[in-house]
Image (cartoon, rainbow, N blue to C red):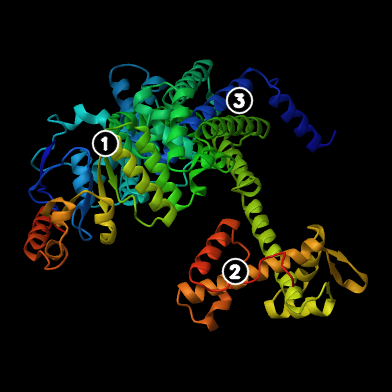
Amino acid sequence: MSEGAAIASELWTIATFRGGFNATLVIAGTSLLGLAAGVIGVFALLRKRSLVADALAHATLPGVALAFLVSAALGGDGRSLPALLAGAAATGALGVACVQALLRYTRLHEDAAIGIVLSVFFGAGVVGLSYIQANASAGSAGLTGLIFGQAATMRPSDVALMGVVATVGVLGALLLLKEFTLVCFNDDFARVQGWPVSLIDGLMMALVVLATVAGLQAVGLILVVALLIVPPVAARFWTERVWVLVALAGLIGALSGYLGAVASAALPRKPAGAVIVLAAGAIFAISLLAAPRRGVIASAWRRARLRLRIAGEHLLEAAHDRGVDVIEPGEIAAVARERGWPRAARIFVAWSLVRRGDARRERRGALRLTPRGIDRGRRVARNHALWEQYLVSYADVAPSHVDWSVDQVEHVLSEELVAELESRLASLGRPAPAAPGGAR
Amino acid sequence: MHAMTVAYQRKPVLWDVDYDAPANRLIAIVGPNGAGKSTLIKACLNLTPRASGQVEFWGEPYRRARSRVGYVPQRESVDWDFPVSALDVVCMGRYRKIGWCRPVSRRHKEAALECLDRVGLRDYARRQISQLSGGQQQRVFLARAIAQEAELYFMDEPFAGVDAATERAIVEVLRELKESGKTVIVVHHDLQTVREYFDEVILLNMRVVAAGPAREVFTRENLQRTYGGRLTLLSEASEAIARAERPA
């Protein structure tokens, strides 16, 4: 068996939860974490607080160091995870409070306030860690793991913690979806209605703290914010509804956790946290490109189609103006030169006219217009004339300058707007251009 | 109905505003840019802290009168690329009636749909709000306020940058509100339409220049006092206080 096939078979074994107890445990833990962070991250995104979450994550480090020192001084094991996470949550929340205080009482903008809190707290944490390394007898191996994450060290109790966090996150989002959405969309309106906006904001932030602290062990404090930001942003490409966004973000987060843990288990010495973030990044990239409405490809396709349609209409209009039913290749070339189309575009324009049923191909590349195509040419020409008259009589545009803007607008006029133009011009007592369907 | 005295100390933008709004009228707040029109509304609704003075609604503080007060914020105050539909936004007007943690029931959705119908947007209920024109977005906000079923409405520049169809729809709704016994206080920009649309006018420029029935108050002389002759002393005093409070 080749090496590639061996890795593939091992991946499959792990992915189907047959890779041994430890691997399965890690996969379950990171999937639950991804689910919770994805769901909770939606509200950080909609409240435009994603970066505050980053400051929060970095501000957990001094808390970890403090918790270690305190519990060691009290005679306990400095590396007990619950104590470390409690310390992390405390200074993380303090960091968020500092950002808000800076915004409220100084003239700093949010980016600067976040930058200051993030770096100063992280610096304090690094100093604390080096002090522990130099002085503490117990050693600090477990602490540095919280910076970059050590998913492989997960124990059953840690996975249970992830399960609790995921349950709280999902329940909170379900129960308070309406309140969270309202505050994110329009906090002033919520206040006027009498909702306790600070309390609701506080609940949202508490969930973010929870997800961040839960993610320290698996992903590490530097990258944990990615789990809060990336899945919701990726999900946003696919939907325009909040509850779908919440469900999708949770799904994408869980999928990232799952894929990342599987991949890092099959490829030894790859840190699970970073691979999880890369998996989320890959899903984001796919969403960015392939999403049906908001995706890059879809919008490029829409633009291209609109341009093709406009180009085709220019051809039809030219045929209408010259009173011919057959467009000769020479005429296509002439319009193309005048409009500055690239050579390849001529083929596409002709193709799209045929496809829309506006024309049929004749011998030697000529196009014979169908009745439908003739009618469209007439309509476009009329819109052109209507809009021209409107600009001259209403907008005081000099007749010689009218043509440029007319060229763009005539193709996008809705029937409603055409009717409005007709009635306005009629009220001015100007003769409207001949109606479509009239004699040519 | 309610007497309000509003003044600020941190950065004074309104000085000693005293006004008693009559019930069941359409009231315009008119004044130049920076006169404190929006601030006046926000101070009434406790959105901006007041340095001194109090606002009373039917003789009670705002927090007791809340359920009887509706609000239309400025359109630009929210992000319209938000993943909700027009109907979702209108439903927000009923959230207080629905209460904590409960989903929006069919009955409330029907009520919200009725409100969209009143502003002529029933067919747009499922549209995502970024796909609405500016005027349609403004009408969605108006529908949300109607959904609040209040007795007194505050509207912050509902006519700003809207098309003719929207302006007609808004005026229509204002008249209906008045006919059903409501009071509406509107921040308004267009001086030409004040007399046509409103019964009462507050002319505002950091203080109340004049207030009362539109026919009596909306005069050339009062307008000149509001817009003309700059209130240099007041605005300079404000600047000075602001500088002292917050050294640059």
Could you tell me the amino acid type at mark 2? Answer: Gln
Q: Residue furthest right?
A: A363
Q: Position of residue B246 (x, y in %)?
A: 14, 54
**Residue A179 lies in what quarter of the image?**
top left
Position of B227 compared to B158: left or right?
left
How far apart are labels 2 and 3 at the CA level? 55 Å
Q: Secondary structure at mark 3?
A: helix
Quadrant of the snapshot with the N terminus of chain A: top right
Looking at this view, is B88 or A414 the one in front? Answer: A414
Q: Secondary structure at mark 1?
A: loop
How far apart are labels 2 and 1 at the CA level? 46 Å
* Mark 3 residue crowding within 10 angstroms, few (<14) / some (14–19) / many (20+): many
Could you tell me the amino acid type at mark 1? Answer: Lys
In front: mark 2 or mark 1?
1
**Which residue is tagged 1?**
B182
Q: Position of residue A131 (x, y in %)?
A: 32, 35
**Residue A367 lies in what quarter of the image?**
bottom right
In front: mark 2 or mark 3?
2
User: Which chain letter matches label 2?
Assistant: A
Whether residue A393 is visible: yes
Q: Secondary structure at mark 2?
A: helix
How far apart are labels 1 and 3 at the CA level? 60 Å
Q: Earlier in the sequence, mark 2 or mark 3?
A: 3
Position of A425 compared to A111: left or right?
right
User: Which chain letter matches label 1?
Assistant: B
* Mark 1 residue crowding within 10 angstroms, few (<14) / some (14–19) / many (20+): some
**Which residue is tagged 3?**
A27
Residue sitting at x 53%, y 16% = A156
